[in-house]
Image: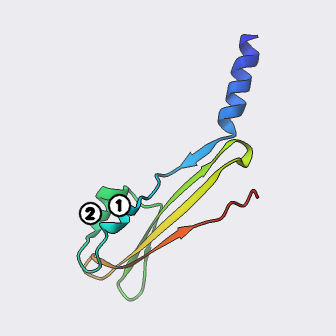
Amino acid sequence: MKRLFVLLAACVLAACTTYGKPVTQAQLDQIKQSVTTKEELLSSFGQPLATTRNSDGTQVLSWGYTKVGFAGSSYENQGLSVVLDATGKVASFTTTDMANPYK
């Protein structure tokens, strides 16, 4: 019986997945064009999932958050990409909220 319970608990836990941290509106409100630095972004959001260097000297930092409930019963997916100018300050940023692909 104990083994059955452990197996069932493992299946339930495996069916739920979370990756990254959600981005709040308060965090987004702190991002200021030509003011916020790369160091401040790293302090607020942690290490980015991807870093891109463009030929014009700009850099793009990207973060993501995904949460999928049991068997797709709930779904959240956010993305944040920030373009840094050549001095390492925010030039612009984009947020993405994706629809539930399980519906």
Check the image and name the residue furthest to the top.
Answer: 1
Label 2 to label 1, Cα distance in Å? 14 Å
The three-letter amino acid code for the residue at tag 1 is Ala
At which x and y percent is residue 77? 58, 59
Q: Which mark is residue 40?
A: 2
Q: Which residue is mark 1?
A: 26
60 lies above or below 14: below
* Viewer-side residue, 51 vs 21: 21
Residue at (73% x, 15% y) in the render: 3
Which mark is in front, 2 or 1? 1
Give the class, few, some or many, for how many residues have Cα within 10 Å of label 1's Cα (few <14, many ≥20).
few
* Viewer-side residue, 62 vs 26: 26
At which x and y percent is residue 98? 61, 66
Between discs 2 and 1, the one toward the N terminus? 1
Query: Would you say 68 lies left or right of 95 here?
Result: right
Give the class, few, some or many, for how many residues have Cα within 10 Å of label 2's Cα (few <14, many ≥20).
some
The three-letter amino acid code for the residue at tag 2 is Glu
Number of marks: 2
Indicate the quadrant where residue 86 lies.
bottom left
* Viewer-side residue, 2 vs 77: 77
At which x and y percent is residue 43? 29, 57
- State the SS at label 2: helix
Image marks 2 and 1: residues in contact by CB distance under 8 Å: no
Residue at (62% x, 44% y) in the render: 17
